Image: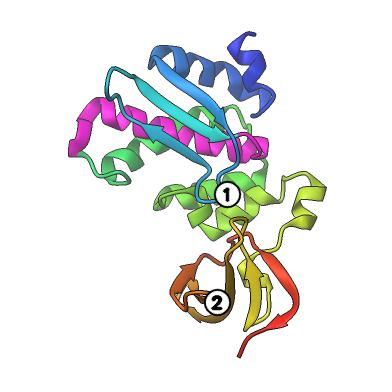
Amino acid sequence: MDKVKVLEKYLPAEAAPLIARWIDYFKCEFKISRNRNSKFGDYRSPYGGKGHRISVNYDLNPYAFLVTTVHEFAHLHTWNEHKQKAKPHGTEWKNNFKKMMQPFFEKEIFPADVKKAIVNYLDNPAASSCSDLNLYRSLRKYDPPKTSEAILTVEKIPLKALFKLKDGRVFRKDEKLRKRFKCTEVATKRIYLFSPVAEVELIEGATAA
């Protein structure tokens, strides 16, 4: 099937032709991946006879899919220019990310609230769009309704409540430390820091001292 037609299933149709051209121009293996809790997308530089590889989670809404795709292509472009000399999210990457996002602004692809959040994010882009809470929340507004209703995040559950991750591990929510919540794994008593928007399953009626 034509690349553009495939991409149109996952990102805004107006953006698909340019992303398809990038895939060809950069000779990139572009994979639409299963859901990964820890990241929306991934870039791998050429290694062991393989070329550039980008993967993006299949279940992102079209705007989140596009933001993530541009994010990863900015890594690719930065690697082409600087190889390992540039930091993963350093100045070189930030400049490329801003530059590569511009065509989509010119096409007015994003809703006003998402565009505003992206502009703010571009001032100091973090490791991923889910690291920026304002951008993350703006993007999540455009998830399918059923998905949004089913999502429960760490910030929404009560203090001392128990919650479970998809891998089955159980944690207790503790106090907030700056931007993240301190949480204790029940089985090991180890402390972990969770993003406020980390998606979890509440264990109903369970709290821990």
The quadrant of the rendering that contains the C terminus is bottom right
Residue 114 image point, x, y percent:
62, 46
Residue drawn 24% across the image and 27% down it: 81
Residue drawn 21% across the image and 31% down it: 82
- Which amino acid type is marked by label 1? Lys
Residue drawn 66% across the image and 14% down it: 5
Q: Residues within 10 Å of mark 1 (few under 14, many from 20)?
A: some
Q: Given the current orientation, which residue lies at the most extreme top position?
A: 1
Residue drawn 29% across the image and 32% down it: 78
Majority secondary structure of the magenta segment?
Answer: helix
- Which amino acid type is marked by label 2? Val
Residue 187 image point, x, y percent:
53, 74
Which circle, 1 or 2, is nearer the viewer?
2
Q: Is residue 110 left or right of residue 44?
A: right
Q: Earlier in the sequence, mark 1 or mark 2?
A: 1
The answer to which quarter of the image holds residue 164 is: bottom right
Residue 194 image point, x, y percent:
51, 67
* Mark 2: secondary structure: loop
Q: Nearer the viewer, residue 113 or 133?
A: 133
Vertical position of residue 174 compared to residue 31: above or below: below
| Mark identifier at residue 38 | none
Q: Which residue is mark 2?
A: 186
Vertical position of residue 18 compared to residue 111: above or below: above
Tell me, yes or no, if residue 99 can be seen here: no
Task: Give yes or no for contact between labels 1 and 2 (Cβ–Cβ under 8 Å).
Answer: no
Q: Which residue is mark 1?
A: 116
Q: Given the current orientation, which residue lies at the most extreme front position?
A: 187
The quadrant of the rendering that contains the N terminus is top right
Question: In the rendered structure, which segment of residues is drawn in magenta?
Answer: 58-85
